[in-house]
Image (cartoon, rainbow, N blue to C red):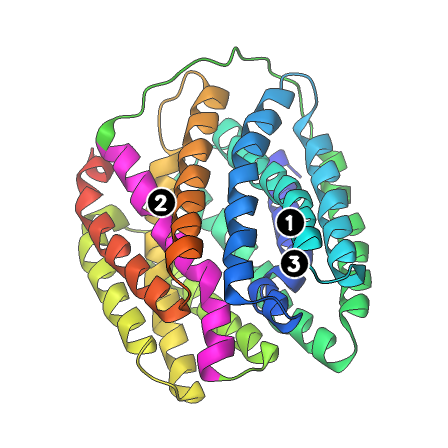
Amino acid sequence: MNNNIKYNIFLLLSTLFRNLVEVFNIALLYKLGYSIKNILLYYTVFFSISILVNVLTIYLTNYIKTKYILILSNILFCFSYYFLNKMNHNITNLLIFALINSFSSYMYHSIRHYYAIKHTKLSNSEIGNIAIYTFIGIIISSYLGPFITEKYSLSITLIIMSILSIISIIPLLLIKDNIVKERIIDVKIDRNRKNFFILEQSKVLFLLIQPLYLYLYITNDIKYIGIFNIINSIASIIIIYYIVRKINVNKYFKYTNILLIMVLVIKLNIVNKYLTLLIAFFEGLLIKIYEIVSMKNLYQLKIDNIKSYLIKVEVIFCLTRSIFMLVSFLFINDIKIILYILLVFIFLSSFSIKVLEK
């Protein structure tokens, strides 16, 4: 079994245990009594701290094997949700949760990106495989997490999450992983590509906020969020397996993105929970094309200094997210308005396609 297979198994298992709670995290915060303004503050702090976490994590790969950083991120992730479950639900503790969760999440995501660029050729097929393993984990956990939490308790969900976290370490320990030292330098990213990186964060934030929209406007049942995610993910796997791995999706990005926006606008204007699930399928088809284009844009580059490149990219990502959340926290207190503003930026990202065709 080669390293890529072991890594993909880790992706499946790590996605499985993390998504047990991440699938409804934003709705969970609301259920625990935090206001929309509190939640926007939480994400402002979360993404602001992640800028430092990304830099620190990539720097540490000069001295620590990546698999040990991933194991530490597992431990911190589990601890952060145990803290959320047991703490008094006030602003101070919410910000402490943001601090711990930011470290656990962005240590994980930074190393995921680093490993993907360093160890794989990242052909269309390999990018598709990474996405498929991830979505298998999402499909299994999306209903399981909300169902167990609603039927039993968050504590039971966290126990299962911890067990799966330990199991996910096994394929990691089997990966042959050497420390590669690189001097951290300033790398240049061309303007068009940088613009795409900034604008594509609107898609990331839309998907982040979407569960709270479903909870507030469609049905206040967190299990419904899981069902929506399952349908969305099944559609994503279908389009990856039959289309994305076989054609150059960059050529059609502008058109599929406009279709995606139309689907999302329709979703924001219906309240029927069954029609919304139908929309979830079409959203899954189109959002995955967007994400594959994003992954190709991020990974398929000839890079001499991977670590410096990733630091710069992740800073762009997290700075963009934190600024948007800060503006939303200060001036907007309506989830629907925030989602419509994000749709405008998703639309604008269609016109940065030139960089993807080079």
Q: x, y (%) of residue 271?
A: 38, 86
Write down the residue under mark 2: 294
Identity, as a three-letter code, of the amino acid under mark 3: Leu
**Numbered circle sitting on residue 95:** 1
Residue 81's place in the image compared with 192, above or below, is below
Write down the residue under mark 3: 16
- Crowdedness near tag 3: few (<14), some (14–19) or many (≥20) residues, C-alpha within 10 Å: many
Looking at the rendering, in which quadrant would you find the N terminus?
top right
Separation (CA) of disc 2 from disc 1: 30 Å
Residue 256's place in the image compared with 121, above or below, is below
Residue found 81% across the figure and 56% down from its top: 163
Identity, as a three-letter code, of the amino acid under mark 2: Ser
Q: Which residues are the magenta region?
A: 192-218
Kind of element beneath mark 3: helix
Q: Can residue 248 be seen in this view?
A: no
Q: What is the chief secondary structure element of the magenta stretch?
A: helix
Which of 141/124 is in front?
141
Q: Please report whichever mark, 1 or 3, sits nearer to the chain's N-terminal start.
A: 3
